[in-house]
Image (cartoon, grey):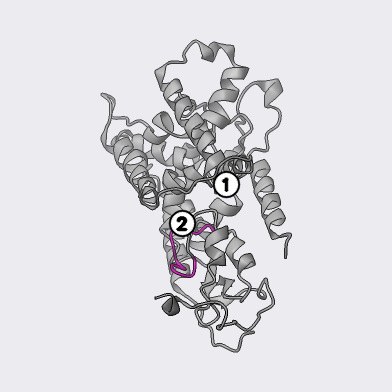
Amino acid sequence: MAGLAAIRKWVQTIFAILVNGSWSFPFTRMIYQGPLKVICSPGLNCYSCPASTTYCPMGALQHLLGGARMAVVSGQYYLGLYVIGTMGVIGGFVGRMVCGWACPFGLVQELLHKIPSPKFGVPRWMRYIKFAVLLFMVCLLPLLVVDQMGIGSPWFCKYLCPAGTLEAGLPLLLMQPSLRQTVGWLFFNKLIFLVIFLVWSVMASRPFCRTTCPLGAFYALFNKVKVVKLGFDLERCTNCQACHKVCPMGVRFNESPEDTECISCLACSRACKFGAINLEVAGLPFGTSIHPVREPVYGVVPRHDEHK
Amino acid sequence: MDGKKHKVRQMPFVVILVFLFAVTLGIMFKEPGRVLEQACQVCLSCIGIG
């Protein structure tokens, strides 16, 4: 099924258009302000992007946590339950499949990676940075570091998020000249992060997803308990390592089938000639093997234990 | 399909129910209105000038 990669690109494009479906912004020079913005964007997509029709769960969560003290004092319990609950429902169904199929910033990185250049891996330890970003920049710092009014800042949005700079910062500065006068070191700091991640994306596969994205980190928590996931059949695996070579996230699927980095893009399933990797829904096989199952050729391809 | 017995995993549905409960609580606290209010304003922090 050579068209699977093309199908995924189409799905990614459709999601990118759906969550950025307000195309009147060149005339209004403003962001969309309609009722659809109560709907959660499954992927990282800044809600201050002029075309954005949904809210960004990371941005919304930080703002709710930042304003939690003030809200509670005034008798309103805005604690982020709606946002966390929505993200949890999405995570419980598909987890990081969102990253592979529905995240606009993931699509940007994948397209950049197609530019011919020397390609490099991403050090494995860097995957843990995004969990720290989620814990500190998205949850704890907005909640605990507050100003005199008792309001916290959205640390991730303010100091780091390259999607916000790309999708909202640059377009709004182009459209609204009055905003340009307010540009300072904060903007240039974010611009540097954006440039770093864009250049890095050319040379490495999905570096932001793998190292920094707090939304990916949140969805990664569901990789063992999500409904739709990739199943692994150990009996069919010949350890040919074809799945290692094609994974855009650097996952060695046959060694860690429940790896938190897996975005269920199905590249490994397509590459596996022995039908050892297949989509499962709640533990039940979904559809048929992408490749017709062939008998493993044990004499030719060494198994794990035969390496040693 | 492959002759093996497969068991339905129930844990994902428990997890989804827990989070649906959180969504319900959020709606009870009128959080969607607050989210909409925030999302309809230009977030200066998000664009790097706030």
Quadrant location of the C terminus of chain B in the rendered image: top left
Q: Is residue A258 shown in magenta?
A: yes
Which amino acid, by three-letter code, is at mark 1? Cys
Q: Where is residue A55 in the image (x, y as percent from the top left)?
A: 53, 40
Q: State which chain disc 2 sits on.
A: A
Extent of the magenta region: A253-264
- Asked whether residue A211 is drawn in magenta, I would say no
Helix, strand or loop: magenta stretch: loop
Q: x%, y% of residue A179?
A: 52, 15
Q: Residue at x 62, y 31 (%)?
A: A32
- Is residue A55 visible in the rendered image? The answer is no
Query: Residue B2: horizontal and vertical position, in percent?
Result: 61, 85
Which element carries disc 1, helix, strand or loop? Answer: loop
Which badge, 1 or 2, comes first in the chain's sequence? 1
Q: In which quarter of the image is the N terminus of chain B?
A: bottom right
Q: Position of residue A101 (x, y in %)?
A: 60, 53
List the residue tagged with mark 1: A103
Q: Please tell me how crowded label 1 is: few (under 14), some (14-19), or many (20+) other residues with Cα within 10 Å.
A: many
Q: Mark 2 points at which residue?
A: A261
Tell me whether circle 1 and circle 2 mark residues in contact (CB < 8 Å).
no
Viewer-proximal residue among B25 and A6: A6
- Left or right side of A143 for A303: right
What residue appears at the point 48 percent right and 78 percent down from the top-left corner?
A303
Disc 1 is attached to a residue of which chain?
A: A
Circle 2: element type: loop
Residue A308 relative to residue A208: left or right: left
